[in-house]
Amino acid sequence: MELGAYGVNDTNRDEAFLIFDKLGKELDSDLVVRRVEPRREHFARNIAIEANEESLVQGQKVPDFKLTNMEGTDMSLYSDILKENELVLIDFWASWCTPCIMMFPHLKSIYADYNEKGFEIVSVSLDSVVLDWRESSEEQKFPWINLVEIRGMKGPTAVNFGVQFVPKSFLVDNYGCILKKDLHPELLKESLSTNLQTDSP
């Protein structure tokens, strides 16, 4: 099992859970806590991420979340953010993600053009260290909502959104329905122009 006898995509992966559970009953409890349970949780989490990624398609609603901003205030996606905006880009990133950092200047330009027309961005950091998130956020000077889930890709929000890589983004309407996923900046501008019924800047 430790050598990866079962992969997430294996058709017989259900057998893995039976083996993990059997090992949990037969091995020393300390060994189970240190080596069996973490691997079982990792395996189950990867399967959940894969399933969530496949289910979150255009027209489906994204899961709700409540995360903390730089001021230490919790913000809910549905009750605090979506109800105040027409379209929202949920952008998953991390301070160590170079492609994420390279995307921000483009997003800032788009945000400046469309924010007053009903567009909002919510950056969700998947950093594992608060200081890394804070330092990178201060460097980037985000003009939009900036939240964090300090559990890397193991956090419930990342799992619920099927995040297997960053950057990862979802463009949703104010009902939480997915319009597009993983949009290049130019395609994002096109979607905003069409859905906000405005002319492109």
Image (cartoon, rainbow, N blue to C red):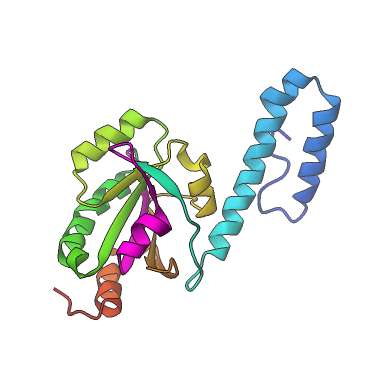
Please identify the quadrant where the C terminus is shown.
Answer: bottom left
Range drawn in magenta: 69-95
Q: Residue at x 64, y 50 (%)?
A: 47
Give above or below for 15 relative to 138: below
Taking the magenta stretch, the answer to whether it contains residue 79 is yes
Give above or below for 125 relative to 9: above
Single out the residue that lies furthest toward the left: 201
Q: Residue 67: where, in percent of width, then height?
A: 41, 44
Q: Quadrant of residue 51?
A: bottom right
Q: Is residue 79 left or right of residue 61?
A: left
Q: Residue at x 30, y 65 (%)?
A: 85
Give above or below for 51 relative to 114: above
Please identify the quadrant where the N terminus is shown.
Answer: top right
Q: Is residue 168 left or right of residue 119?
A: right
Q: Is residue 122 left or right of residue 201?
A: right
Q: Quadrant of residue 129?
A: top left
Looking at the image, how many numbered discs can be counted on the residues?
A: 0
Q: Residue at x 62, y 39 (%)?
A: 42
Q: Residue 55: where, in percent of width, then height?
A: 57, 64
Give above or below for 9 relative to 140: below
Taking the magenta stretch, the answer to whether it contains residue 60 is no
Q: Residue 50: where, in percent of width, then height?
A: 59, 55
Q: Is residue 5 left or right of residue 168?
A: right
Pick the residue in front: 123 or 153. Answer: 123
